[in-house]
Structures are given as structure tokens and as C-alpha cells.
Amino acid sequence: MDKNLEEIEEKASILIGALPYIRDFAGRTIVIEYGCAEWLSGMQEQSLMKDIVLLKSVGMRPVVVHHTRMGMDKFRENKRIAKLLELCGRKAIGICGIDLETIGITLDHDYIPVIVPNDIDNEAESIDPLETACEVAVKTGAEKLICLCRFPGVFTDESRTDVFPLVTIEEMETLKADRGFPEEFVHVINPCIRAVEQGVGRSHILDGRIEHVLPIELFSVDGAGTAIIQNRDHLYAHERSR
């Protein structure tokens, strides 16, 4: 078989394999906490923006909540990220603070909202973007809260070679108690748990430095990080049929 044809067939197979996931997530709001910017090069960041635009292009409604790099202006950074998304071919607009009405309008008009946690009234305050993302996910009825950080998920054992692809809230609380996670990781876990407790379909902890981590996690069986769900009754159709 021609090598080019083999490559085309492989790409087609990947796309076909993604169809059940695309079907389950179409029209759903996906809140992405972009907290890994300081560990990405310019090229890596642009690749990540393309992946977010991909989610939008297959029918999801992504919302980006971002951390501001040290020494950078919060509102300028907001515009910069929105511009990067627009350079990938989709409309994006910066929003200051948790303005639910504006978020809803932008989503309904086919924009990608890009949220900085601060607004003019609290510009100088230090506001955790993951806490903001959690609140936005809950208040918008999001299907997913995705935390893009430097943690790959929850490791299955001390060898630190594999992560749990899926855990329930109860299982995660047990792991927290047994493992003695570092405070920085607990700081990531807790809002992810709280979002699911308050109605978000599931939370995902992903290493944002992994190339194409979003489509790998959302469109493949094993994914790339750890997802937290309420319980085993909260599985997607394509997961129940495995």
C-alpha cells in the first residue's frame, strides 16, 4: 500500500474514532482554566489555542479562564489570548470578571469568551483563576471543568508512570487522605471536586505542557490525565458501551 494512503487512512481512523465523543459533547459548555502559560513556549501556546479552536469547531462551547503571567498586565494579557484564538480562525472576546450575562451572550453569538478573574473594581487583588473557572463552570451549567496545569493527573502508584484516567469523588477523597498530596496539588484538586459536587459533569486535571492534551483527553478512550466524576452512574454513552 502507498505510504501516503496509509497515513491518510490512519488519520481517517482517528477522526472516526472521535465521533462518539464529538456526539456526546456537542453543544456542551467546556470551561478551560489556562494555568500553564508560564511553562509554554510561544509555539506551544499557539498549538494549544488551535486545540481550543478545534473544540469549538466540532460543536463544543469552550470558555477560557486564564492565569496572568508574572509581570504582565492582566487586561492586556486577556486581549492577547483572545487575539491568539482569533488568529486560529474563530471569534473570541475578552471578559473581565464573572459576568454571566456577557458570557452567555458571547457563547450564543459563536464567540469564545476569554475571562480574566479581575475587573476594574478589583484589579489589584489576587484572584485564583481556578476558583474563578470553577464558579463559571457551575453557574453556566458546564459539562466540563478542565484544569490545564503542570500536573499530569493522579498517579496510580509510587512509580509515577501511569495516572488514573477516571476517579469518583469518593475515590479522590480517599486518595487525598491516603497519599498526602502536596499542598499545591490539593489546591488543584479541591476546586475540581467542588465543581462536580455542584453539578458540573466532570472535571479534568491535565498537564498543559503535553502537545494536543485537550483532544487526546476528550477524544480518546484512555485520555491524557485524570477525570473526576460524581459516581460510576455518571458515565458517557461511549464509556458504557466499552
Image (spheres, helix red, strand yellow):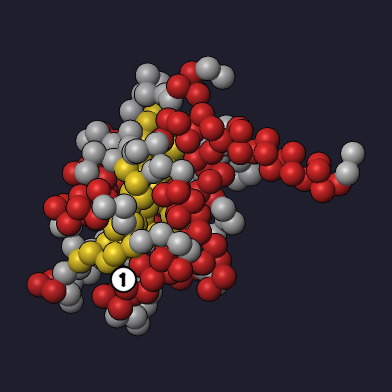
Mark yes or no: residue 28 visible. Answer: yes
Position of the N terminus by quadrant: top right
Q: Residues within 10 Å of mark 1 (few under 14, many from 20)?
A: many
Q: Which residue is mark 1?
A: 78
Q: Nearer the viewer, residue 70 or 133?
A: 133
Residue 233, picture quadrant? top left
Amino acid found under the numbered disc labelled 1: Asn
Relative to 87, is 188 above or below? above
Residue 13 shown left or right of residue 151 in the figure: right
- Residue 122 placement (x, y as % from top left): 13, 71
Q: From this viewpoint, which residue is outermost toward the right?
A: 1
Residue 163 shown left or right of residue 38 in the figure: right
- Residue 161 placement (x, y as % from top left): 63, 44
Residue displayed at 43% across by 25% down: 236
Residue displayed at 9% across by 72% down: 121
Residue 113, picture quadrant? bottom left
Mark yes or no: residue 187 visible. Answer: no
Position of the C terminus by quadrant: top right
How many labels were placed on the picture? 1
- Residue 158 placement (x, y as % from top left): 59, 42
Secondary-structure class at tag 1: helix
Relative to 167, is 241 above or below? above
Relative to 237, is 116 above or below? below
- Residue 204 placement (x, y as % from top left): 42, 43
Relative to 214, is 64 above or below? below
Residue displayed at 57% across by 53% down: 212
Q: Nearer the viewer, residue 53 or 180?
A: 53
Residue 20 shown left or right of residue 15 in the figure: left
Residue 198 shown left or right of residue 36 in the figure: left
